[in-house]
Image (cartoon, rainbow, N blue to C red):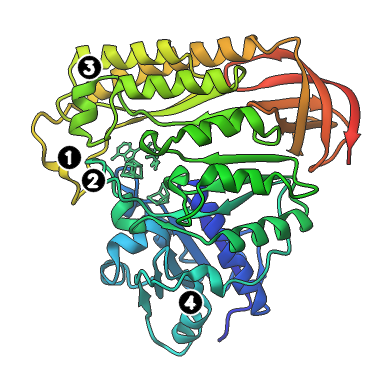
Amino acid sequence: MTPKTFKIKNFGCQMNVYDGERMSELLAARGMSATAEADDADLVVLNTCHIREKAAEKAYSDVGRLRREDGSKPLIALAGCVAQAEGAEAQRRSPMIDIVVGPQAYHRLPEMVDAAVGGNRPVDTDMPTISKFEAFPARRKANPSAFLTIQEGCDKFCTYCVVPYTRGAEVSRPWDAIVAEARSLVDAGACEIVLLGQNVNAWSDGKHGLADLIRALAGIDGLERIRYTTSHPADMSDDLIAVHGEVDKLMPYLHLPVQSGSDHILKAMNRSHSTETYLRIMDKMRAARPDIALSGDFIVGFPGETEADFQATLNIVDEVGYAAAYSFKYSARPGTPAATMEKQIPTEIMEDRLARLHERIEAHQLAFNAGKVGQNTQILIERMGRHAGQMIGRSPWLQSVHVATDAGPGDIIDATLVAAGPRSMTGAILQKVAA
Ligand code: SAH
Ligand code: SF4
Ligand code: F3S
């Protein structure tokens, strides 16, 4: 029977969230409607992530849980990075999986659903040169803060990472397509656009770079805020740094992963930058935009990481004074060079280092947030809070701010930041300025 309803479950990064929205639009264009729960859907799409340990195992157990009490099951599509990595093997391991579709092939999902209804078990992990983006319907609905993928894939081949294998080579979308999609997102209700890419600052159309694109997007009426993520230090051009000092709509926030504070670990990771070049970029960012909130990613327990290497990571955290940072235990990924390196670090040591790093990062987050107490600023309201009358929004520095207000999602309000925690702030309303 042809499915009438669907549920897409997203895991992993923001690019998967974007892909999930696109798949949802494709299915809706076919007359299907979304359900709140997987249990009520005729088709369930698991949009998976492969970045860390046991990703595939988790995906298979998630598939298993889709079996219903009466023994029936929905049509199941495995999508995302696990689908890309496992390919047809996924259907050998789990007979419940009807469709396997990779991140560069999901524009074909509707036809694959038809094929599955016809009794086939389609697998598509191609990385077509004709961009999937051209197959998508126009944007009709957008969150106040909307994602827009402008670049995909990665050519950097950090020795621990699966992304170059699951997402393919670096590809930039054309300028006109991006500007048109940004306009349609704003028409559909977005007031903030977050430009996405695995290496978003590598975006280029041959003539322009990301800085030029940001300048152009800033000219769109009704678009109030622009952000971009994730950047790589090797592609952090002076022009992109400069644009932070020029364009008011570009929010004062930069997520720039460093991974480690030790140069020989960075080398073994094939990161193509040193701690010195990284710190110099952060200095230049602060010179261009003194109030910038800096953020990063860290991996602890990369093969060969000594206590001294780890201390160097703690030092770089202190030196940058991050407003936010994300840290992960190293996870050996099959097929990556680091997985077979000597001196893999025992789990207990990784856990101990992760806890110490968390503590250090949290202290800096709290210090950054505390430094903003008393500041008048603007909050983009995104959603309802836990208590009646309470809303949650974002400050320009991407702090999550709780505020009692009758403003709704998409409103930008003037507020004073009145109290700080390590992961969020409380704001008090001044006056509503835009609706
Ligand atoms: N392209 C981005 C993000 C890649 S994935 C970048 O290069 O920064 C997001 C984060 O996951 C990485 O920054 C890294 O900190 C972490 N990560 C990637 N592979 C990992 C692995 N094998 N083990 C642990 N963390 C990993
Ligand atoms: Fe992975 Fe490195 Fe590419 Fe980031 S730059 S996606 S960490 S290979
Ligand atoms: Fe995960 Fe793929 Fe994103 S592995 S982090 S969903 S690019």
Q: Quarter of the image containing the N terminus?
A: bottom right
Residue 347 in the image: above or below residue 124: above
Q: CA distance from mark 2 to mark 3?
A: 22 Å
Q: Which mark is residue 338?
A: 1
Estimate how packed mark 2 is, as few (under 14), some (14 to 19) or many (20 or more) residues with alpha carbons within 10 Å.
many
Regarding mark 1 in the picture, which secondary structure is present there? helix
Q: Which residue type carries mark 1?
A: Ala
Picture quadrant where residue 278 is located: top left
Asked if marks 2 and 4 touch (Cβ < 8 Å), the reply is no
Q: CA distance from mark 3 to mark 4?
A: 46 Å
Q: Which mark is residue 333?
A: 2
Disc 2 or disc 4, which is closer to the eye?
Answer: 4
Q: Which residue type carries mark 3?
A: Asp
Choose the circle earlier in sequence order: 2 or 4. 4
Q: Which residue type carries mark 2?
A: Arg
Q: Which residue type carries mark 4?
A: Arg
Q: Which mark is residue 309?
A: 3
Specify whether 72 is left or right of 315: right
Choose the circle earlier in sequence order: 2 or 3. 3
Question: Does the rendering let one see residue 69?
Answer: no
Asked if marks 2 and 1 touch (Cβ < 8 Å), the reply is yes
Disc 2 or disc 1, which is closer to the eye?
Answer: 1
Label 1, ligand 1: CB separation under 8 Å:
yes
Residue for point 71% across, 12% down: 419
Regarding mark 3 in the picture, which secondary structure is present there? helix
